[in-house]
Image: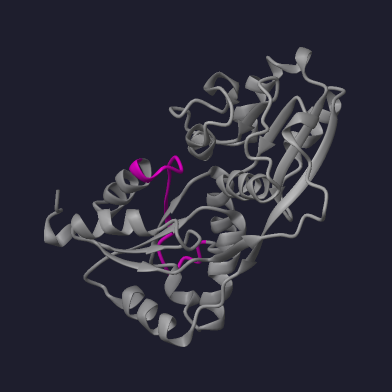
Amino acid sequence: MPLPANSQASVVLTRPKGKNEALASRLQAAGFSTLLLPALCIGPLATGPVLPKPADYDLIVFVSGNAVHYYLELLATHGLDGAWPATTRAATVGASSATLLYESGLLPEANILHPDASLASQDSESLWPILQQHLPTTRKVLIVRGHSGREWLGRRLLEAGLQVDRLAVYEREPAQWKAQEGERLEGVLRDEARPCVFLLTSGEGVDAVHSNLSRLGLAPLWTRARFIAIHERVASRLQSLLPATGKVDAPMVKICQPNDDAIFDAIVQIALS
């Protein structure tokens, strides 16, 4: 439902390419203007001639939706997309990341583990209590991830006496926004009639956005914006880059779950603030 004209905002969506379009359409239908500026470029990473197979592990943990996507793609490339034994569980650190696993039909839904979608935090810490319930029947674990990331969950599994292997299947690189994109963003940031809301979904993404703004000479304007972050760590990283100076209001930050429904609701709420 469209918002009152005086409450509408401009929204900068910084998730990777392909992740913003549906949300942008929904926001535009509600009267928001949107600017799609991915902070990170994500692509497949070469894994070598030997691919760790589901049959080799009791549990495969995916750190993100991208980890699921690229691993399933590799299984198909190696002709292994039908070779997921019923004894191998899969786990994701967030409920939304499990969607591709459910849709794949490769394993029973009961063998797909993830935090409850209603939990405010969708992360390794939320997944860990669920994994602990299955430790007695788990010996070998594969963590599928990007080329870098947190080691918290891997350390917990090692401390529990399990064998833990890691497989990097994708890489993240900071996007380089073009001058034309910078001009459009500057117009949005300088528009005093409409608040500007940034969606931020990772610490690396926050760094990449800040780097682009600094390179384009727009960093001082960023303090005027409002922000949606999908985790406390993302919000903390943002706050470290935008300390209150006394010359401007402290950044307005709202934390929400990473799914589109929660993000949409959060944007509406912060636009009305």
Considering depth in this image, is 68 or 270 the residue closer to the camera? 68
Residue name at image x 26 percent, y 53 percent:
26
Horizontal relation, residue 166 to residue 208: left or right: right
Image location (x, y in percent) of residue 122: 54, 35
State which quadrant residue 63 falls in.
top right
Image location (x, y in percent) of residue 267: 32, 51
Image position of 207 with respect to 135: above or below: below
Residue name at image x 54 percent, y 58 percent:
238
Residue name at image x 74 percent, y 39 percent:
143
Q: Main secondary structure of the magenta part?
A: loop
Q: Which residues are magenta?
A: 244-261
Image location (x, y in percent) of residue 195: 29, 64
Magenta segment includes 88: no
| Residue most extreme to the front | 79
Considering depth in this image, is 160 or 193 the residue closer to the camera? 160
Q: How is the image coloured?
A: one colour
Residue name at image x 53 percent, y 66 percent:
39
Horizontal relation, residue 151 to residue 104: left or right: right
**Total residue callouts:** 0
Considering depth in this image, is 30 or 220 the residue closer to the camera? 30
| Residue most extreme to the left | 4
Image location (x, y in percent) of residue 139: 83, 22
